[in-house]
Amino acid sequence: MGFVITVDGPAGAGKGTLARRLARHFGYAHLDTGKLYRVVGLAVLRGGGAPADPAAAERAARALDAGAIAAGALDEAELASERVAGAASKVSAVPGVRAALLDFQRNFAARPPDGAAGAVLDGRDAGTVVCPGAPAKLFLDASPDVRAARRHKELLARGEVSIYARVLADIRARDERDRNREVAPLRPAADACVIDTSDLDPDDVLARALAHIAGRTAS
Ligand code: C5P
């Protein structure tokens, strides 16, 4: 098993940016685990089902296999929409959905694609459930207003219609579901390095993460 770095935290905390930069820095493979839940949410929506319906959600999760992922299921542009994010946050509370996606994530960490020497997994429970033994764990957080402002800017930059108050309400609703669900609730692992990114730029966040990882590597 190569070196594994986990990056968890709520929406808009900067996980994706940090995880991509860490993967580039070390030459590791990167898995955005949120995309797995988004694919499941999108599949339920497309099938005309309700994301909060456990049976429909679990069926969609079981249908998602490594072959579909390798064929580009995680690359669809529609996965980035707020509608799909909301659906993802609902299907992700279903225990059977989480169980169905666990093996793929653990295999990715244990045997990263393309012979990479390590993996960076970002999500909500990468450090607590998927890879509790990972040597380096980061947990990013930021105030809801800062996270909503970042997300709003991102949506506008993509040419989408976005209303700040609506984005903030969606972020709060997702936080509430992610933190309070019974299975794998969003929380930092006991040995995670917690970074509040509210007043930091991506370079500062990367520097702090690298300092943590260097310490972990040495131990
Ligand atoms: O990170 P992203 O915004 O793409 O995640 C979408 C939703 O998927 C989150 O709101 C969360 O409910 C769920 N998720 C999860 N566990 C993960 C990653 C994402 O429950 N490891």
Image (tube, rainbow, N blue to C red):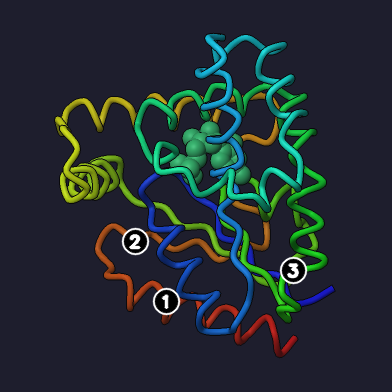
Please state, as top left, top right, bottom left or bottom right, where the N terminus lies in the image.
bottom right
* Residue 177 located left or right of residue 33: left
Residue 156 shows in the view: yes
Question: Which of label 1 and label 3 is nearer to you?
Answer: 3
* Dot 2 or dot 1, earlier in sequence: 2
Q: Which residue is mark 3?
A: 112
Q: Residues within 10 Å of mark 1 (few under 14, many from 20)?
A: some
Query: Which residue carries the number 1 mark?
Result: 206
Which residue is tagged 2?
A: 197
Identify the residue at image location x=76%, y=40%.
65
Residue 25 coordinates in the image, percent (x, y):
51, 84
- Where does residue 190 sit, x and y in percent of width and height? 67, 56
Spot occupied by residue 5 in the image (x, y as percentages of width and height): 64, 69
Q: Amino acid at mark 1?
A: Leu
Q: Residue 187: horizontal and vertical position, in percent?
A: 58, 44
For the residues labelled 2 and 3, the Cα–Cα distance comes to 28 Å
Residue 163 drawn above or below residue 156? above
